[in-house]
């Protein structure tokens, strides 16, 4: 075993003002019961950078069972990685026990399968993915506790793995997508060895479970930095490892598709000569830009159906053969089905993306009946969000967007005037069947990331 790393500490007085009071309660109660406890990970990183953390995580020497006993408002979750959730209303403070990196695996296969070996706070720092994510905050001393030179990398704006990058990426290939996510979000560079390893290990991404891959893809799309994230996925070739059936849609062969995406990405898009039809690849980058602007501008995170529509719309706009509704419907299905089954996309999300893409066509066609019942649909609100993204991406349909927004406002006002039991009645008074399942309308929780 190498020597234990020494921690460096640096005091931060302003830190405490930004710490969530419920997270503080959790840490203090654990300390009071004689355990070690720190704030850890993303929240320390973000406060250090002067950003507002999304959520607060706690690391402690207490086992999940002891945490459970200390907090009536808690629950143990996870199998591969057991930890406790402490609830404060809708807020969750994720509280995990210090654990050590898995012992050196035998042979070639480094993939981590279980991850419940308890350890010390130093061990817990060393098992984390990136130096910028490996910092602890000691709320009593008001110090950042740093075993991994994370503060140096935060100062220099670098994503660097803790330990040998190739090993860390092989152990858990999802870390490669996480590296991309943090580099894009924080506008950081990669430390050179970390970058080299990313390129060398990218192929391993296909070993990950599709559920984890899908969740990471959604996170990239929801994060507000999708454009930069997907650029990095193209440059590292992670994209074609994660979504081969999707990337292939951009060219005759994988090489051609990759090259097309790459060329469109580095092109100065505003220089597009007027009248030139954008390719699907160009449109993808524009859609991702528009998605980011929408999320950053409104703080609203679109539902998965909208995110999927963003991915598939660029492939539809360039298609001239989609004259009729049926043709469009069939084409959407052809595009989404292989990708959907490869990644295990929920039927509900796929169906919503389809409805949104179909509705967009209707909303944009001037021949569409004005008194359409689209505004009554469950997905209308999300279709309108998508239409906003689409208008930004393509430059087409500003007037229609304005018109549909006015209709939405008028409808909202009418609904708030109507007695509650009549609100959802369709025009013409036709009654709906009682239960509609209701699943497809779920909004993402703020923690969906
Ligand atoms: P975000 O702001 O997106 O929540 P985060 O850094 O909090 O960023 P999480 O996914 O919430 O990221 O994970 C919390 C912490 O757990 C990380 O900061 C990191 O220390 C550790 N971690 C998460 N996933 C991994 C992984 N795959 N391998 C090693 N450590 C990980
Ligand atoms: Mg987090």
Image (cartoon, helix red, strand yellow):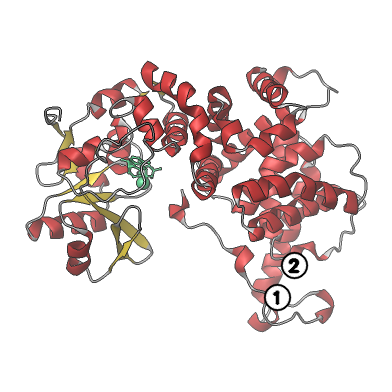
Closer to the camera in the image, 31 or 172: 172
Q: Secondary structure at mark 1?
A: loop
- Residue 428 location (% of width, % of height): 84, 78
- Residue 43 location (% of width, % of height): 30, 43
Q: Does 409 sit above or below residue 237? A: below
Is residue 152 shown to the viewer in this render? yes
| Mark 1 surroundings: few (<14), some (14-19) or many (≥20) residues within 10 A | some
Mark 1 residue's CB less than 8 Å from ligand 1:
no
Q: Does 157 sit above or below residue 54? A: above
Residue that label 1 marks: 424
On the rendered image, what quadrant is the N terminus found in? top left
- Residue 209 location (% of width, % of height): 50, 46
Q: Secondary structure at mark 2?
A: helix
Q: CA distance from mark 1 to mark 2?
A: 7 Å
Residue that label 2 marks: 376
Number of numbered discs visible in the structure rendering: 2
Q: Are marks 1 and 2 in contact (CB under 8 Å)?
A: yes
Closer to the camera in the image, 248 or 274: 248
User: Which numbered circle lies on residue 231?
Assistant: none
Q: Does 120 sit above or below residue 438? A: above
Is residue 159 shown to the viewer in this render? no
Q: Does 179 sit above or below residue 403? A: above
Choose the circle earlier in sequence order: 1 or 2.
2
Instruction: Left or right? Give the position of 8 relative to 396.
Output: left
| Mark 2 surroundings: few (<14), some (14-19) or many (≥20) residues within 10 A | some
Closer to the camera in the image, 10 or 316: 316
């Amino acid at each position: 075993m190498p020597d234990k790393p020494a921690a460096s500490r640096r005091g931060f007085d302003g830190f405490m003002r930004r710490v969530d009071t419920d997270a503080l309660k959790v840490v203090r109660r654990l300390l009071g019961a004689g355990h070690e406890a720190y704030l850890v990970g993303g929240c320390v990183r973000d406060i250090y950078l002067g950003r507002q953390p999304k959520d607060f995580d706690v690391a402690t020497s207490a086992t999940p069972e002891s945490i459970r006993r200390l907090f009536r408002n808690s629950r143990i979750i996870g199998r591969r990685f057991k930890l406790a959730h402490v609830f404060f209303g809708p807020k969750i403070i994720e509280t995990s026990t210090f654990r050590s990196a898995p012992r050196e695996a035998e042979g070639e296969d480094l993939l981590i399968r279980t991850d419940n070996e308890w350890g010390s706070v130093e061990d817990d720092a060393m098992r984390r993915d990136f130096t910028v994510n490996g910092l602890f905050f000691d709320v009593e001393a008001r110090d950042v506790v740093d075993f991994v030179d994370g503060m140096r990398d935060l100062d220099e704006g670098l994503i660097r793995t803790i330990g040998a990058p190739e090993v860390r990426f092989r152990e858990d290939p999802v870390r490669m997508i996480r590296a991309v996510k943090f580099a894009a979000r924080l506008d950081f560079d990669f430390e050179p060895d970390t970058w080299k390893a990313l390129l060398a290990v990218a192929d391993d991404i296909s070993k990950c479970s599709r559920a984890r891959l899908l969740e990471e893809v959604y996170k990239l799309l929801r994060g507000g930095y999708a454009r930069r994230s997907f650029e990095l996925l193209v440059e590292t070739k992670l994209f074609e490892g994660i979504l081969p059936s999707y990337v292939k849609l951009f060219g005759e062969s994988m090489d051609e598709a990759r090259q097309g995406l790459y060329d469109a990405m580095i092109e100065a898009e505003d220089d597009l000569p007027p009248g030139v039809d954008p390719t699907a690849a160009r449109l993808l980058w524009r859609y991702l830009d528009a998605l980011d602007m929408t999320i950053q501008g409104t703080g609203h995170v679109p539902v998965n159906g909208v995110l999927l529509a963003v991915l598939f719309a660029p492939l539809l706009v360039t298609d001239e053969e989609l004259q009729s509704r049926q043709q469009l419907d069939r084409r959407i299905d052809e595009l989404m089905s292989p990708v959907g089954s490869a990644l295990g996309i929920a039927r509900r999300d796929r169906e919503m993306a389809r409805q949104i893409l179909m509705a967009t066509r209707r909303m944009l066609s001037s021949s569409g009946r004005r008194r359409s019942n689209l505004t009554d649909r469950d997905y209308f609100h999300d279709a309108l969000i998508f239409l906003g993204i689409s208008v930004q991406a393509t430059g087409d349909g500003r007037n229609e967007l304005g018109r549909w927004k006015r209709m939405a406002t008028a409808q909202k006002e009418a609904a708030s005037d109507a007695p509650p039991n009549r609100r959802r009645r369709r025009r013409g008074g036709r009654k709906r069947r009682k239960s509609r399942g209701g699943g497809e309308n779920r909004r993402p929780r703020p923690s969906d990331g």
